[in-house]
Image (cartoon, grey):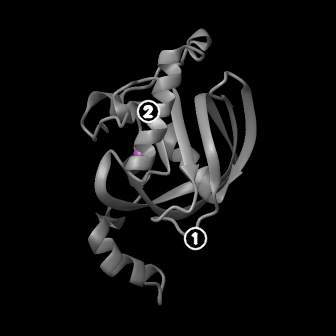
Amino acid sequence: MILKVARLGFPSIRTVAQPVATDRIATPEFQRLIDDMVETMHEYHGVGLAAPQVHLPIQLAVLEVENHPRYPDMPSMPLTVLINPVVTVVNPAPIEDWEGCLSIPDLRGLVPRATEVQVQALGRGGERLDFAARDFHARVIQHETDHLKGQVYLDRMPDLRQLGFLDEWQRFLIPCQKPGAE
Ligand code: NI
């Protein structure tokens, strides 16, 4: 089932999410929620979706990049379910890139993110996950786990002049940033 996506202003977007009780993970209701979040992420061409974005302030996020129309040059990321994630910055050297968010429609902003993180979480079967992520993968994880802290990418922007509407960004900002790009 495709879920309604909460936009900035809905309280869950600014609420610190609660941990998921581990005995809840295997329940049909929770497994269905994960399926619905994956379906919703696909429907809206997101690369990630956090539970607060579907009105639920709990520590659950899904992410996936596979032949993504908006990010054709990005390396693929397998479908990953993160429950109660803890993200540790391994390499804090920031790199800037453009981000958008399904809860902040039509906008893009330039956001510095750490280039490498270590992620500990539970997977959808309750199994322990512990993996390193770099570059775009690390960026998506930081974006999604920020949602679980009630934060959005705008909070991470040092310069709000680097915020624009997607269609204007495609006309003006991409040519400025990357000469010759389409
Ligand atoms: Ni987002």
Real-space CA distance between mark 1 and mark 2, rounded to the nearest whole angstrom: 27 Å
Q: Nearer the viewer, mark 1 or mark 2?
A: 2
Secondary element at tag 1: loop
Q: Percent from the top left, x then y, of residue 169?
A: 33, 72
In the picture of the structure, the residue carrying the numbered disc 1 is 73
**Quadrant of the snapshot with the C terminus:** bottom left
In this rendering, position of residue 145 left or right of residue 77: left
Q: Quadrant of residue 8?
A: top left
Give the image quarter of residue 128: top right
Is the C-beta of the residue carrying label 2 under 8 Å from the nearest atom of ligand 1? no
Tag 2: residue type?
Asp
State the residue position of label 2: 36
**Label 1: how many residues lie within 10 Å, few (<14), some (14-19) or many (20+)?**
few
Residue at position x 36%, y 37% from top?
2
Outermost residue, left direction? 9
Q: Earlier in the sequence, mark 1 or mark 2?
A: 2
The structure residue drawn at horizontal position 60% and vertical position 33%, both measured from the top left corner, is 82
Can residue 149 be seen here?
no
Residue 99 in percent (x, y) is at 44, 58
- Say if 57 sits above or below 162 in the image: above
Which disc is residue 5 wearing?
none
Give the residue at the far bottom of this rendering: 180
The kind of secondary structure element at disc 2 is: helix
56 and 30: which is toward the camera: 30
Amino acid at dot 1 = Asp
Q: Position of residue 180 (x, y in %)?
A: 47, 90
Task: Tell me: 120 left or right of 24.
Answer: right
Please, is residue 31 above or below residue 114 in the view?
above
Q: Is residue 118 visible?
A: yes
